[in-house]
Image: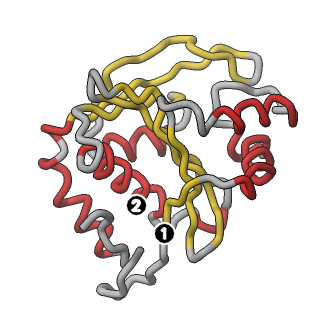
Amino acid sequence: MTTGASDAPSHAVVLRDVTEGDRQRLLDWRNSPEVAAYMYTDHKIGQAEHDRWFDGMASDARRRYWVIEVDGEPVGLANLADIDARNRRCAWAYYLASPSVRGLGVGSYIEFWMIEYVFGPLGFDKLWCEVLLSNESVWKLHERYGFQREALFRHHVIKDGAPADVVGLGLLAQDWPARREEMARRLLDKGYALPFA
């Protein structure tokens, strides 16, 4: 949710559970060139493959998905993966499928939300992610939030028929407080209310 506390235009951003009504939307998003360009796989996902993935979500305790809505409109997907309660860590990722919300700070809000959720309600110690090296805007956003580069996986995936490098980044709960205040202020300046406040 947002507040109009600043002069910046505010937008209501909500992460809601995935429902059956999202089945076709998620397939369309995943196969769109804007989203597929930053995924590990290049092939067009068919209905049967998508249905297996979609139907398996509910029974897989190691992953969790949310549809991102901006001002009531679905615009993207966020998820946790490799949820490991014993080691108190998980991975995360997101994408914005709607070009209309780019540049509004939605990605930054989602980043803040996920970090707060993982280190707050979940009580985990580490949040990590992998990003194509070519997706510079995203791994730089992670670094602004305090993620540290922990790995460079060379020639890790094949994209457009050529090997592509992947950056591995991690953020520890103990390191988050050093970045939290500045990142919270930036969100508030854009008109966003802080999640879990």
Q: Quadrant for residue 168, please give it.
A: top left
Q: Is residue 46 left or right of residue 18?
A: right
Of the pair 78 and 155, the residue shown nearer to us: 78
Q: Quadrant of the N terminus?
A: bottom left
Q: Is residue 100 left or right of residue 51?
A: left
The residue that appears at 29% across and 63% down in the rendered structure is 196
Measured from the top left, where is residue 7 in percent x and y? 35, 88
Q: Residues within 10 Å of mark 2 (few under 14, many from 20)?
A: many
- Secondary structure at badge 1 equals strand
Q: Is residue 102 left or right of residue 32?
A: left
Q: Residues within 10 Å of mark 1 (few under 14, many from 20)?
A: many
The residue that appears at 75% across and 58% down in the rendered structure is 21
Which kind of residue does numbered mark 2 sit on? Tyr
Which residue in the structure is indicated by mark 1?
13
Which of pointers 1 and 2 lies earlier in the amino acid sequence? 1
Measured from the top left, where is residue 98 in percent x and y? 67, 60
Q: Is residue 197 above or below residue 176?
A: below
Which kind of residue does numbered mark 1 sit on? Val
